[in-house]
Image (spheres, grey):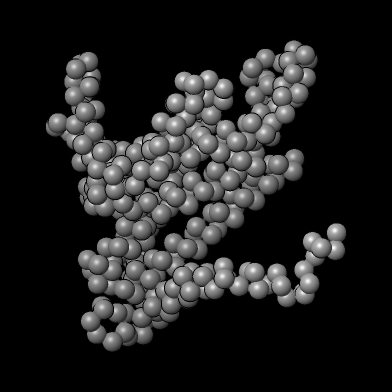
């Protein structure tokens, strides 16, 4: 047992030092610098000018902050709920030892490992309102078509659907791992008590999947908040800014408007919002698990 203990009390901290150094250089320092820049007005050409909370005030008064917040939250709710439901459904359907199930699992997960740009280009063709594959299929069966990326009312949901399609394989794999960790004896005992399929899922599977569900929900939330490539490639924040999520709004402020201060203010708000939502989500799932 003594061989498992560190020789010196400081040894564990030395092992943590490389990770802490990377976090300090690539996370904490940029975050602190973003807070500093959010208090300045800077166009990348002249010297920064201190304006205090002026950038935050300007974002609120112009409505940009509220619009980016509502758009991002709407997108995230659809993506998190959709990817979890689809991932769980696929996991339940494919949790079996057959060659066909293994093939489908690999095919579904392959979408997750493809780059975001490749996925965006693929779906840009599929969702084209004139010559897209989806439009052609709907026309062939006599159903009405939509301008999937040009209609402000549905463009955001089209991008959410693309994101769900890409990350559903990730959710599926995690749910499969959770399902395979559940002892078969619990299902057998429930079946002996007369529980049907739905009762076994609700009383055995779902409670034991709560830790996995919390992890999937948290990671899906972070992915949905960080979406950029599909927006940049497919809609460029349009039409009429209906798909301008937080990250794309930050990109616009820096590279199109040369307003580094406002972009930094958006970064600070974005980080705070993501931190609060993640904490609330984890708290909610832990509270459910404790009851």
Q: Nearer the viewer, residue 161 or 72?
A: 161
- Which of the image's four quarters has the C terminus? top right
Q: Is residue 218 visible?
A: yes
* Residue 257, picture quadrant: bottom left
Q: Position of residue 151 (x, y in %)?
A: 22, 39
* Residue that lies at the very extreme toward the left in this rendered image: 130
- Which of the image's four quarters has the N terminus? bottom right
Residue at x-position 26% and y-position 78%: 44
* Left or right for 148, reference 166: left
* Residue that lies at the very extreme toward the front in this rendered image: 3
Q: Is residue 32 above or below residue 80?
A: below
Residue at x-position 31% and y-position 79%: 41
Q: Is residue 81 visible?
A: no
Q: Position of residue 65 (x, y in %)?
A: 37, 61
Q: Position of residue 29 (x, y in %)?
A: 48, 75
Q: Position of residue 86 (x, y in %)?
A: 47, 31
Q: Nearer the viewer, residue 63 or 146?
A: 146
* Residue 263, picture quadrant: bottom left
Residue at x-position 54% and y-position 44%: 217
């Amino acid at each position: 047992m003594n061989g498992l203990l560190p020789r010196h009390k400081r040894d564990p901290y030395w092992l943590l030092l490389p990770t802490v150094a990377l976090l300090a250089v690539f996370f904490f320092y940029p975050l602190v610098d973003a807070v500093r820049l959010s208090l300045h007005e800077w166009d990348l050409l002249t010297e920064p000018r201190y304006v205090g909370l002026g950038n935050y005030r300007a974002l609120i008064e112009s409505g940009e902050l509220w619009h980016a917040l509502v758009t991002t939250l709407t997108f995230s709710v659809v993506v998190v709920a959709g990817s979890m439901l689809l991932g769980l459904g696929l996991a339940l359907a494919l949790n079996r030892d057959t060659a066909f199930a293994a093939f489908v699992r690999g095919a579904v997960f392959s979408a997750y490992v493809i780059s975001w740009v490749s996925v965006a280009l693929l779906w840009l063709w599929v969702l084209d309102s004139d010559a897209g594959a989806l439009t052609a299929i709907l026309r062939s069966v006599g159903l009405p078509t939509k301008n999937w990326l040009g209609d402000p009312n549905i463009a955001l949901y089209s991008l959410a659907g693309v994101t769900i399609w890409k990350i559903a394989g990730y959710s599926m794999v995690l749910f499969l791992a959770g399902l395979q960790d559940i002892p078969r004896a619990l299902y057998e005992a429930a079946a002996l008590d007369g529980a049907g399929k739905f009762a076994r899922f609700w009383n055995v599977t779902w409670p034991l999947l709560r830790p996995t569900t919390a992890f999937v929900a948290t990671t899906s939330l972070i992915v949905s908040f960080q979406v950029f490539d599909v927006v940049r490639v497919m809609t460029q924040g349009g039409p009429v800014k209906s798909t301008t999520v937080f990250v794309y709004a930050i990109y616009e402020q820096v590279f199109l408007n040369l307003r580094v201060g406002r972009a930094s203010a958006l970064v600070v708000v974005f980080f705070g919002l993501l931190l609060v939502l993640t904490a609330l989500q984890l708290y909610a799932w832990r509270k459910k698990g404790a009851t």
